[in-house]
Amino acid sequence: MEQYCPPAHVLIFPFPAQGHVNSMLKLAELLGLAGIHVTFLNTDFIHERLVRYTDIETRFSCCPGFQFKTISDGLSADHPRSLIKFIEVYDSLNSKTKLLLREMLASNQLIGSNTRPSLTCIIVDGLIGGFTSDIANEFRIPIIYFRSISASCFWAYFSVPKIIEAGEIPIRGNEDMDRLITTVPSMESFLRYRDLPSFCQVNDLNHCNLHIFVTETQQSPRAHALILNTFEDLEGPVLSHIRTHCSKVYTIGPLHTHLKFRLEAKTSSSQSQSSNNLYEVDKSCMTWLDAQPLKSVIYVSFGSITTITKDEHMEFWFGLVNSKQRFLWVVRSDLVVGEHNRNEVPEELLKGTKERGYIVSWAPQEEVLAHHAIGGFLTHSGWNSTLESIVAGVPMICWPFIGDQQLNSRFVSEIWKLGLDMKDACDRFIVEKMVNDLMGRRRELFMKSTNEMAWLARKSVSEGGSSYYNLDRLVKDIRLMSMEAD
Ligand SMILES: O=c1ccn([C@@H]2O[C@H](COP(=O)(O)OP(=O)(O)O[C@H]3O[C@H](CO)[C@@H](O)[C@H](O)[C@H]3O)[C@@H](O)[C@H]2O)c(=O)[nH]1
C-alpha cells in the first residue's frame, strides 16, 4: 500500500530587490511545478511593481497551489529604497516587518484558505535569515536559507572572521590592493584584496554593511538546509568547503534555465517565459537585434541597482562609440546620477549611437543574451547576469560595482576564463580596447571555455544532472518534513 503523504506548503520570503525576488520566484515556481503549495511573501512596494510589469496570472497558472501575500517593509511610500539606503531598508525589515511577520504567522494569515495545508517550512533569503529564523523557531517551523549570490561569495563572507584574525583586512593603503588574501580556503592563490566583496574593503571593521553580510552568512548553519543558485561543475571546490559547515547544501542552478527546462518538459512547449520584471520591458531591441549580423553586438547592462556618475556615463559612451562595434545598452532611468542636458552630449556620440547602437531603459535580458547577434556582454557582474551569460555562452567584460560583484568578476576572468575583468577602471580608452579585444582579437580565446561552461550549465539542469537531482532531493526533503509534522 502506498504511504499517505500530506501536501507540503512552503512560505518563500525574499529580500525586496530585483536580483533577489527574481531568483526566488523561479525557485518558487519550480517547487510549485513539483506540486508543493507555495505562498510567496513580497513587500507591498515590490509586489506593486511586479504586478505592474509582469503578467503574474499567466506566469503562475501552471502552479495551482501558488499564492502571493504581501507585507509592509515599514518604510514611507516616498522612500527611495535604493542601494544607498540599504541600511534603512534592512533595519526597517528587522524591526517593523519582523513584528508583522510574527503577527501574520500567529493569526494564520499566511495560509490563505482552509483547503491549503499549514506551513511545512519557510525558505527565506539568507540576507534576512536572522530575524526570520528567530520567528520560525518560536512557531517551530523549520527554516531553509536561500542565497542569491555565488557559492564563492558566500564562502568569502563566511571566511571573514578568519581574514580579520590573520590581519589581512583592513589594508594599509592603495599599494596593498593587489596583495593576496591567503586565508580563504580554496582561493589562496588568486584572491586579491581588490577582489573581496566590496563590503569587506573597508577601513572600519565595525562598518554596518560588513557586519550585516558577515553575521547573516555566519548564521547559515542554523538552518535546516541551504539552497544556492549555482551548479557543481562551476563551484565544486568551494562547495565542498561550505558543506563542512552546512550539512545540507542544495545547488539547483542556474535557476532560470532549470525552470525553463522543467516548464518545457511539463507543457511540451519551447516558448516558456520565465522572467520576472520590476521594470517595464522594452522589447523593441529584439527587432533591432534581428537586423544585426551574427555575434556582432556587445550588450551592456549594469543590473537593477548600479548607479554611475555623469563622467562615468561619458567614459562608457565614448568607449563604446569609439570601438566602432555595434552595441545594445540598458540605461535605466535611474542609472546616471544627475541629468545630462541634451546639449551636453557631444554630437559624435549621438551620431555613433544612431549608426551602430540601440539604447533601452530595460531589456528582456535572458532573451537578449540568447540572441544570435550578441557576441559579448559588458556587465556589472551581478550573479544573475553572470549565470545568464554563462548559459548563453556569451563572453563577458566585467565592471563590478558593489558587493559580490568584485569577487564574481575575478572568477569570470581568472578561474573560469569566461572574459575580461575591468574592475576599478572607467576610462574611454580602456572600454574601447576591452570591447575590441572581446569582440575581435581575443574572442577565439574565450569561445572554447564559454561553450564548455554553457554545456555544463545546461547538463546540470537536464534530467540526470546535478542540479536536477538536487532539486528532486529538496522536494523530497520538504515532503518528508510535512510527513513528520503531520
Ligand atoms: O535590462 C535588464 C537588466 C537586467 N535584467 C534582469 O535583472 C536581473 C539582474 O540581476 P543581477 O545581475 O544579479 O544584478 P542586480 O540587479 O544588481 O542584483 C543584486 O542582487 C544580486 C543577487 O544577490 C547580486 O549578485 C548583485 O550584485 C546585486 O546587485 C537579471 O536577472 C537580469 O536578467 C533584465 O531583465 N533587464
Image: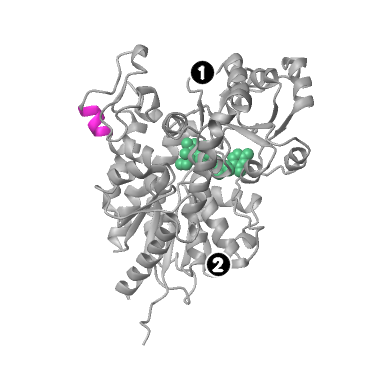
Percent x, y for residue 463? 48, 61
Which residues are the magenta region? 160-165
355 or 58, nearer to the observer = 355
Q: Are marks 2 and 1 in contact (CB under 8 Å)?
A: no
Label 2 element class: loop
Residue visible at 60% across and 14% down?
429
Q: Which residue is mark 1?
A: 425
Q: Secondary structure at mark 1?
A: loop
Q: Is residue 306 magenta?
A: no
Q: Position of residue 102 (x, y in %)?
A: 36, 58
Residue 41 against residue 219 in the figure, above or below: below
Examine the rendered structure and indicate whether residue 31 appears above or below residue 307.
Answer: below
Is residue 224 shown left or right of residue 58? left
Q: Earlier in the sequence, mark 2 or mark 1?
A: 2
The residue pinned by badge 2 equals 63
Residue at point 38%, 59% (across, down): 122
**Considering depth in this image, is 396 or 346 the residue closer to the camera?**
396
Residue 21 visible at all: no
Residue at (33, 28) in percent of width and height? 207
Residue with the most extreme bottom position:
1
Image quarter in which the C terminus is found: bottom left
In the rendered image, the residue lying farthest to the left is 165
* Image quadrant, ligand 1: top right
| Disc 2 within 8 angstroms of ligand 1 (CB) | no
